[in-house]
Image (cartoon, rainbow, N blue to C red):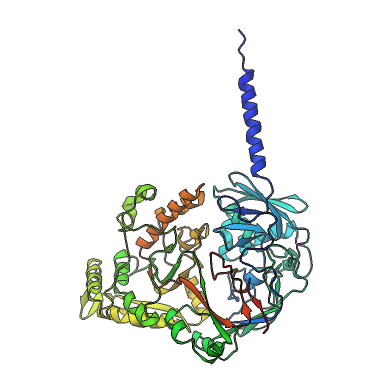
Amino acid sequence: MVPNFFPRAGALIAGFIAAIAAQIVAAESAHGIAMYGTPALPPDFVSLPYANPDAPKGGRIVFGDTGGFDSLNPFVQKGTPPWQQSFWSYESLMGRSWDEPFTLYGLLAESVETAPDRSWVEFTLRPEARFSDGSPVTVEDVIWSYEILGTQGNLRYRGLWGQIESIEQTGPRSLRIAFNTADRELALIAGMRPILKKAQWEGKDFTESGLGEIPIGTGAYVISDFEPGRHVTFRRNPDYWGEDLPFRRGTQNFDEMRVEFYGDGTVLFEAFKAGALSVIREPNAEKWQSQYDFPAVRRGDIVKSEIPHQRPSGMTGFVMNARRPPFDDWRVREAMLLAFNFEYINDTLTGGAQPRITSYFSNSALAMQPGPASGAVRALLEPFAEALPPGALEGYALPVGDGTARNRANLRRAADLLDEAGWTVTDGMRRNADGQPLAFEVLLRQGDGTNQTVIDLFSRALERLGIAVTVATVDDAQYTARTAQLDFDMTSFRRDLSLSPGNEQRLYWGSAGVDAPGTRNLMGVASPAVDAMIDAMLSAETHEEFTVAVQALDRLLTAGRYVIPIWQFDVGRIAHLRQLRFPDRLPIYGDRVGFLPDVWWYQPD
């Protein structure tokens, strides 16, 4: 009997055709891409839901900032540019909606395609996309931008380049990027790189920082005037190519945006009160209540607006450099947390109005759960059980003081831990077995009055423990140089975290490059467990798997005791001229990049 293999072959062929068809469907061009699921807005959306498509154009807004700038190239490692520049003057292939955890919609690109496993992504440029000088944005410009940023740009751009297998033109206006790493977020990250003009940099050194060469951008604003370290002015380009895009409708409404620089926050606040600035953000709840009753507020010329949000708390506080003594010992770091009398400090500085950050992702569903690790979180952590910081599996919570200035119980616990770590008291000073004193320096920016006050209160408790603390207050340039070289013991710290954390987590606390100059891993985390949780987060195919991985990561970072957390910014506080308006519909991320000034407008009286 002749074997009948054709039915099986037919089934295999049918299956193969079905699989190819499924890939074709999954890889169809789309107007947007979401990390999980599908974009919330349809292809024919009119505007972002938190923008007013009828907002008038015109007017002027003046911001204040502390410090200064010595560069107008925000894409290289060298120099200090105005941080606003990269947001106002440059665009990427896709733009982010701040009303979804992580969704991108077409900006320079009119459409996006990706493989079902997101091993590659393809973008098609809009034919009308232009640089500010009127020249068209080409596929050649895009490919060059990815390469130059990935090889010579700021460190924050280089991680993606190492994960790109190939990048090639696939049509007159299209290019495909293939990845060498199983990471579903890369398709989105690839859409968020700024696009620069290749011809501008022919025969020039892209890495040179300075004020003489401003990278030509694709955004709505160009720099029209500046004085180094004093001010910089951005004017809306009347020929901006993207004004009528649905993504841009109702945004970028001001004709002029100016940033004035001041020596410190106190001078900046006085300038706002005097009418030199249009708007100011106030992080301190107590100051918001007690110091915003000046004449312009009473007259109604200044309006106080509070902007709620649903994003994670992130981490704000004082980071300890775990690369070197004494903070390479978790017991010393825990002693610092015990000695830091948050309840008393918070009451003194904010009237107790602002809640404390309890973990990196607190205030969201991504936060670690209290008590021992369980279920899928425990399953992720257990392979690393022997190397985990104490409390990671068993449960860890920040020390809570008794609210008094003395904080005796916590100081006794701190003293016991320091004794256990080998730092014992001799002649009123803690010393190790070699007689070296327990002493460290806190590095602060010039004009950082709030953190200076916090450290002054903290130092009193440390002195009672026999610890010598000095404070080094330096200007912006020195601060940037010292933190880039990891030349600090303890310093102020802030990491904003989103509802969809991704590859930036490798930069913040991944072990790769932990000792490299310019690393953003300031605390010096070098943990295989942390790396594994980031990997699990990036390879998750469902939102449930993703949430579990982030909760496990949050648990490791918090139990690692790398940062002394202070209060969270649970609401945005913005004081502004009454002529400045914003939509009633607020994004879930609240007052973050993409809100002020993006969707605000000037409404004359």
Q: How many marks are shown on the rendered structure? A: 0
Look at 46% across and 82% down and name the residue there. Answer: 288
> Where 364 sits versus 384, above or below?
below
Which percent across, then down, holds residue 70? 60, 79
> Where 134 sits versus 112, above or below?
below
Residue 318: image quadrant is: bottom left
Q: Is residue 485 left or right of residue 37?
A: left
Look at 52% across and 60% down and name the residue there. Answer: 504
Depth check: give the residue in front, 315 or 499.
499
Quarter of the rendering occupied by the C terminus: bottom right
Which percent across, then down, holds residue 371? 31, 57
Q: Residue furthest top?
A: 1
Q: Examine the rendering and report whether any part of residue 469 can be seen.
A: no
Q: Examine the rendering and report whether any part of residue 180 can be seen.
A: yes
Q: Is residue 398 left or right of residue 594?
A: left
Residue 467: image quadrant is: bottom left
Which percent across, then down, holds residue 200? 74, 68
Look at 39% across and 66% down and name the residue there. Answer: 323
Depth check: give the residue in front, 106 or 58.
58
